[in-house]
Amino acid sequence: MVTTLFLRCNTKLFACLQPFDLLDKRISSILKALMKTDVIIIGAGAAGLMCAIEAGKRGRSVLVLDHNKKIGEKIRISGGGRCNFTNRSVNASNFISQNPHFCKSALARFAPANFIALIEKYSIQYHEREHGQLFCDGSAEQIIQMLLEECRKANVEIQTCIHILRIEKDTSFHLLTDHMPLEASSLVIATGGLSIQKLGATNYGLRIADQFGINIVSPKPGLVPLTFHSKDFEGFKDLSGISIDAEVRCNKISFRENMLLTHRGLSGPAILQISSYWNPGDSISVNLLPGINILDALKEDHPSKKQLATILEQFLPSRFVKVWLELRGGSNPMNQYSLIELKELARHLSDWQITPSGTEGFPKAEVTVGGIDTDELSSKTLESKKVTGLYFIGEVIDVTGWLGGFNFQWAWSSGWAAGQAV
Ligand SMILES: Cc1cc2nc3c(=O)[nH]c(=O)nc-3n(C[C@H](O)[C@H](O)[C@H](O)COP(=O)(O)OP(=O)(O)OC[C@H]3O[C@@H](n4cnc5c(N)ncnc54)[C@H](O)[C@@H]3O)c2cc1C
């Protein structure tokens, strides 16, 4: 009996006539031969697509695999749908990593200007917001379409809804998937961070590292709201939605931006930024009046009968002042305070010490801090020092950017650098 086996490879359909009894034996050898490609990239996000484009442009045959139905889900939802795709000024100090120098090489070789040039080539309109953050005028979908068009021009094949069951390595990498076996001489892991599972995030990159004996830096959520025990946050819960220009400090770093009160704790850019530096047990210091000499203001009204709350309401939202003062014995006329008390109040306003109980975790985090230990990788090519042909790029590595377009820039830069090498 003869049967016909249809195989899809690089968008071509192959039909092979097979005697039925030989089918089993031949299937694996035929598939192996057909699905051989130079580069396989796992993860069709920002880093994976950039790497695919660059490798494709160099004439490498590239296959990108993603388990999600849609590619680039985090790009799609980023920046409130407008994708904060980079920042005007990017340098190593905008990143957290056990090796703060690791990111320099890739960032220097594919800088924000290079990505901006690509955006401009596609006539994607964009604008600059505070701190040099660049956003699309229209939609993040434009960035995805641009990357897809670049992939098409570079003959990159993308397959979605593929689940990788096993990876083995001899002289090349053999992938067993729920569709068919695949083989490649270079394997790039671009599976991103752990945040927001419903968008497709998994710990697969870390599991591959484990399989190959590659060290990881313990991952934790970053750019994430902080939570507090209700006893420490009593009264503030009802102030959800109030935003204050604050300077927040933790572990010798500080950020001055808006801080937002939420039902469970604190959020807003200043808190998200500091959360990446926060470790359980640390307290944070909040300067509620950055740039204001509040002691001078208090002293000026010291002889008067004005309420303390009235003075503070000139600088802070009145509902916040009310709760904040209630925790310190309420508001009295100014002339009833001693100078020492006013000094103490001023100190508390510029150094409000609070200890978070935790964070909102990976479901609410924008990024993962930690990941593949940078000591394991070449900073120039992102190739593993232990496993030839194995590369890690993007957020899966222990390189985490600040809020403001830095994480995408790292994805573009590391993807680009590996794309030159695979
Ligand atoms: C809500 C939100 C908003 C953000 N906004 C911004 C912003 O405006 N600016 C900025 O710079 N950064 C932003 N970030 C961070 C940014 O999205 C990431 O740092 C960036 O997407 C990382 O790129 P990546 O390619 O490494 O990973 P990702 O973009 O996460 O891509 C990883 C890909 O791997 C796939 N994958 C995972 N596991 C598997 C598996 N087992 N098999 C196959 N495929 C798999 C995923 O489906 C995904 O497509 C935001 C993040 C979030 C969550």
Image (cartoon, rainbow, N blue to C red):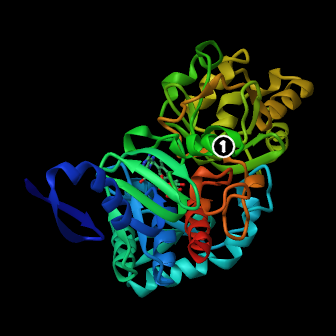
Residue 44: image x %, image y %?
42, 59
Would you say 229 lies left or right of 350 here? left
Q: Quadrant of residue 4?
A: bottom left
Q: Residue furthest top?
A: 231
**In this orientation, which residue lies closer to the viewer: 178 or 172?**
172
Residue shown at the point (71%, 76%) measured from the top left: 108
Amino acid type of disc 1? Phe
Residue shown at the point (51%, 77%) measured from the top left: 54
Quadrant of the frame with the C terminus: bottom right
Residue shown at the point (62%, 45%) measured from the top left: 209
Q: Which residue is mark 1?
A: 315
Q: Residue furthest right?
A: 340
Q: Does residue 223 sit above or below 404 in this rendering?
A: above
Q: Quadrant of residue 16?
A: bottom left
Q: Residue furthest left?
A: 1
Q: Quadrant of residue 350?
A: top right
Would you say 332 lies left or right of 20 here? right
